[in-house]
Image (spheres, helix red, strand yellow):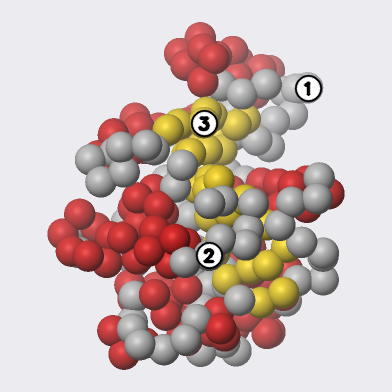
Amino acid sequence: MATTFCLINQKGGCGKSSTCFHLAGAFAQLGMNVLLLDMDPQGSLSQGFLGSEFVESLNSKETMAMLFDESSFFDSYDGLFHPTQFDGITICPANQTLAPFNAPEPEETGMLQFAIREFLEERNNYDVVLIDCPPNLYRCSWVSMVAADYVLIPVPPEDFGTQGLRAVHQCVQQARKLNPDLRRLGHLITRCDSRLLVHRMYEQKLREMYGEMVMN
């Protein structure tokens, strides 16, 4: 089975998609076979690999929305996997068709909570799976945590970037009720300019608060 990482934060623009993009390249350079799951209806990661016009033209059965659409339950997943221009990197994209399924109160969505986990259990030809989540803790983020081995939390060292971290940690704890093996890999400081005093101060504060859980 692949090792699965999901990238989560409640704030947009904190570097989740960029981190997924470059981590995929780093793993591929190491000779690993990488699968990317875009669980953000904005589809930024998908557009980065496949182009905006192509991604926006995809129907729901060609995106991650297929996993939650009852009319697609018995369809093949073949159209969901899109090769990229980079060897070793495949992406299952997202666009606006995923938005209606990203509902709040995801704990009340029954067996759909296991949609991604069951999807990945049938895929044994990948070494690493990276899941890019939207800037909220609704269904798309929840089902990603239920399926993942590790949670990685990108955090810009600034006021808005660090707000809501407590809620993220609480959500991870809740997800462990369905996925006891889920672990926090740590906080990844992103978009940091060491020339700015405010960034240095926030990074120091994060390291004081979370210790070794802030990655180097």
Is 216 on the left or on the right of 155, as rendered? right
Kindly identify which numbered label has been placed on residue 195.
Answer: 1
| In-front residue for pair 164/102 | 102
- Nearer to us: label 2 or label 3: 2
Does residue 86 sit above or below 1 in this rendering? below
**Which residue is labeled 2 in the image?**
123
**Which residue is labeled 3 in the image?**
185
Q: Quadrant of residue 21?
A: bottom right
Identify which amino acid the numbered label 1 is placed on.
Arg
Percent across and percent down for residue 97 are 44, 81
Is 30 on the left or on the right of 125, as rendered? right
**Marks 2/3: CA–CA distance:** 23 Å
Identify which amino acid the numbered label 3 is placed on.
Leu
User: Of helix, strand and loop, which one carries label 3?
Assistant: strand
Mark 3 and 1 residues: CB-CB less than 8 Å, in contact? no
- Nearer to us: label 2 or label 1: 2
